[in-house]
Image: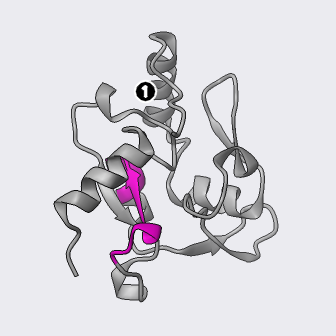
C-alpha cells in the first residue's frame, strides 16, 4: 500500500495545513507534517482517505502504532481519538495556559499517548498563540 500524491494533497487540503490532533499549523513549523494512518497498516488499517489524517511530527511520532490506551481517569482501555469520526471540540479543550485537556476517555487517552502537554509543546503553542497563529481551525 502506498499513499498517492493526490491523496496527500487531498489530506492536506481537508486538514487546511493543520495537525488534526493538536491543531498546530504546518506553516509555522519548520518541518513538514505527516500523513498519518489513524489505524496503522500493521494493525489492519489501509490507505483509504477515511483512515488518513494530517499530523505534526510530534503527534505522529508519539502516536506510533497505538490505536488505544488507558483512560488516565478510569484506567479503562479506550480507543484513541479518530479525527475522521469524531469532532475535536467534543473530546478536547484548549485551556488558557495552552494545555490541551481531554474531556472524554478518548480525549484523555489521546492527550496522554501523544504527549500533547509536554512542556516544549505547550511553550510552542503559547508562542504561536501570542503571534495569532494558534489554534488552527479544521476546515
Query: Residue 104, percent across and down?
Result: 77, 57
Find the residue positioned furthest to the right: 74
5 vs 102, left or right, is left
**Relative to 127, 87 lies left or right:** right
Colouring chosen for the image of the structure: one colour
The residue sitting at 79% across, 61% down in the picture is: 73
Where in the figure is residue 111, as x and y percent of width and height? Answer: 60, 52
Residue topped by disc 1: 124
Q: Residue at x 22, y 38 (%)?
A: 31
Q: Is residue 82 above or below residue 117?
A: below
Per the image, is 119 magenta? no
Q: Is residue 58 magenta?
A: yes
Give the extent of the magenta segment.
Answer: 47-60
The vertical placement of 98 against 100, above or below, is: above
Numbered circles on residues, count: 1
Residue 94 found in image quarter: top right
- Taking depth in this image into account, of 19 and 2 the one nearest to the observer is 2
Q: Is residue 17 left or right of residue 104?
A: left
Question: In this view of the protein, which residue sits in the foreground, 54 or 128?
Answer: 54
Residue found 44% across the figure and 10% down from its top: 131
Secondary structure under tag 1 reads helix
Residues packed near mark 1 inside 10 Å, few (<14), some (14 to 19) or many (20 plus)? some
In the rendering, at what x and y percent does residue 100 appear?
63, 39
Q: Position of residue 56 (x, y in %)?
A: 36, 46
Name the residue: 51% across, 43% down.
22
Q: Quadrant of the N terminus?
A: bottom left
Amino acid at each position: 500500500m502506498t499513499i498517492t500524491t493526490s491523496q496527500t494533497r487531498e489530506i492536506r487540503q481537508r486538514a487546511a495545513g493543520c495537525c488534526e490532533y493538536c491543531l498546530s499549523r504546518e506553516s509555522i513549523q519548520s518541518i513538514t507534517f505527516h500523513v498519518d494512518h489513524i489505524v496503522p497498516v500493521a494493525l489492519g488499517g489501509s490507505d483509504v482517505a477515511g483512515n488518513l489524517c494530517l499530523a505534526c511530527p510530534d503527534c505522529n511520532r508519539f502516536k506510533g502504532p497505538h490505536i488505544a490506551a488507558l483512560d488516565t481517569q478510569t484506567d479503562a482501555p479506550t480507543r484513541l481519538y479518530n479525527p475522521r469520526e469524531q469532532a475535536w471540540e467534543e473530546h478536547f479543550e484548549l485551556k488558557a495556559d495552552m494545555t490541551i485537556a481531554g474531556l472524554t476517555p478518548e480525549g484523555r487517552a489521546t492527550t496522554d499517548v501523544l504527549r500533547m502537554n509536554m512542556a516544549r509543546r505547550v511553550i510552542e503553542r503559547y508562542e504561536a498563540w501570542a503571534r495569532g497563529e494558534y489554534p488552527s481551525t479544521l476546515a
